């Protein structure tokens, strides 16, 4: 596997890696046309792919297990997922999963290396999962209450997504680790008005607790395994969209924001923190992927 980091091998690849090189690509989705616009990190090639229509919600995930991000949208009006797998773009498929008002989530809940289809239902705080290793055997888990924000991340580092929510009213994370579902726990980290952006900033196997504070553009990171402050980083302005990912191929999340006002990506590579980078990609009205800002969820 060459230079792929140990972290990437245990199930924490970049969230938007359409060319499969282990580094995040710059990608935006244009709601007016349903076009995906991607700059591939491997060669700088520009790729455009029409997939979706106005009102859809773009998501990311590797549903076919080829370690490349697939084109995925969820249609709130009918609760249908439309997936165009990278291994065969000519064989898209649809799966009804969810109801209007649900929040779509994609992640590897069963640990088989492929993304699963899931929704979180705010009306009852329940997660509904359709695992890829047994799609005919769906299951649900009540975890959350009115106003909670569902988080897709692997906090215990076992390669499976944990059930997790962040409660804006008190700034507390509530987590059911997949390694021990009988031992849920809570972690206070953040303030009302913050945006939760769980990531892998330390480079350990498990996710870190992180919030982005729009009022001052500061990121606050608490190491998930050590429960000590890992970083406090000012990076962003009011109106920016936090979009952490691994742009430098070192197995760590980089501090990154997308600025809708100028379509600019501003990021700090964790491998070169004194050399911040800029990439103009996108325009006002676009949405970042996998961030579904319209739903208030960041993962």
Image (cartoon, rainbow, N blue to C red):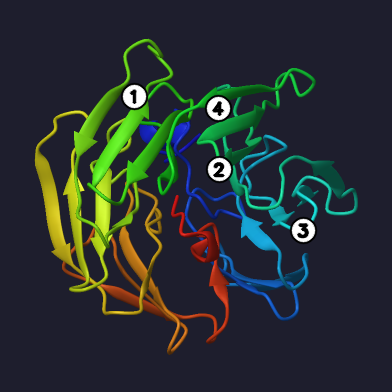
Q: Which residue is mark 2?
A: 123
Q: Earlier in the sequence, mark 1 or mark 2?
A: 2
Decide if residue 72 is on the left or right side of residue 145: right
Q: Residue at x 71, y 42 (%)?
A: 98
Q: Residue at x 45, y 29 (%)?
A: 143
Seen as rendered, the residue at the extreme left is 228
Q: Earlier in the sequence, mark 2 or mark 3?
A: 3
User: Dot 4, how many residues are within 10 Å of its Cα: few (below 14), some (14-19), or many (20+)?
Assistant: many
Q: Earlier in the sequence, mark 1 or mark 4?
A: 4
Q: Which residue is mark 4?
A: 109
Measure the C-alpha gap from mark 1 to mark 3.
35 Å
Q: Which residue is mark 3?
A: 77
Q: Earlier in the sequence, mark 1 or mark 3?
A: 3
Measure the C-alpha gap from mark 2 to mark 3.
17 Å
The residue mark sitting in front, 1 or 2, is: 2
Q: Which residue is mark 1?
A: 156
User: Dot 2, how many residues are within 10 Å of its Cα: few (below 14), some (14-19), or many (20+)?
Assistant: few
Horizontal and vertical percent position of residue 45: 63, 72
Front-lying residue, 95 or 173:
173
């Amino acid at each position: 596997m060459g230079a792929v980091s140990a972290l990437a091998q245990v199930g924490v690849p970049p969230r938007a890696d359409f060319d499969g090189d282990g580094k995040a690509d710059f990608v935006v989705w244009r709601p007016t046309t349903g076009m995906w616009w991607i700059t591939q990190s491997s060669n700088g090639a520009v790729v455009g792919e029409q997939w979706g229509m106005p009102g859809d919600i773009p998501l990311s995930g590797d549903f076919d297990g080829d370690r490349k991000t697939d084109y995925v949208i969820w249609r709130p009006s009918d609760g249908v997922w439309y997936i165009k797998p990278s291994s065969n773009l000519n064989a898209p498929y649809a799966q009804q999963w969810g109801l209007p008002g649900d929040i779509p989530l994609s992640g590897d809940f069963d640990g088989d290396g492929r993304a699963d289809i899931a929704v979180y239902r705010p009306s009852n705080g329940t997660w509904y999962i359709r695992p890829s290793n047994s799609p005919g055997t769906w299951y649900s888990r009540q975890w959350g209450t009115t106003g909670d924000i569902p988080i897709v991340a692997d906090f215990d580092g076992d390669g499976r997504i944990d059930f997790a929510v962040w409660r804006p009213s008190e700034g507390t994370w509530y987590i059911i680790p997949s390694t021990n579902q009988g031992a849920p726990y809570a972690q206070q980290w953040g303030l009302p008005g913050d945006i939760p952006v769980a990531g892998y900033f330390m480079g350990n196997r498990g996710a870190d607790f992180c919030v982005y504070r729009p009022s001052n553009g500061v990121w606050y990171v608490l190491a998930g395994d050590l429960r000590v402050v890992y970083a406090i980083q000012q990076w962003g302005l009011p109106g920016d969209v936090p979009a952490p990912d691994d742009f430098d191929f070192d197995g760590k999340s980089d501090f990154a924001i997308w600025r809708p006002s100028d379509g600019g990506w501003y990021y700090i590579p964790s491998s070169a923190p004194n050399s911040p980078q800029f990439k103009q990609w996108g325009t006002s009205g676009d949405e970042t992927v996998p961030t579904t800002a319209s739903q208030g969820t960041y993962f």
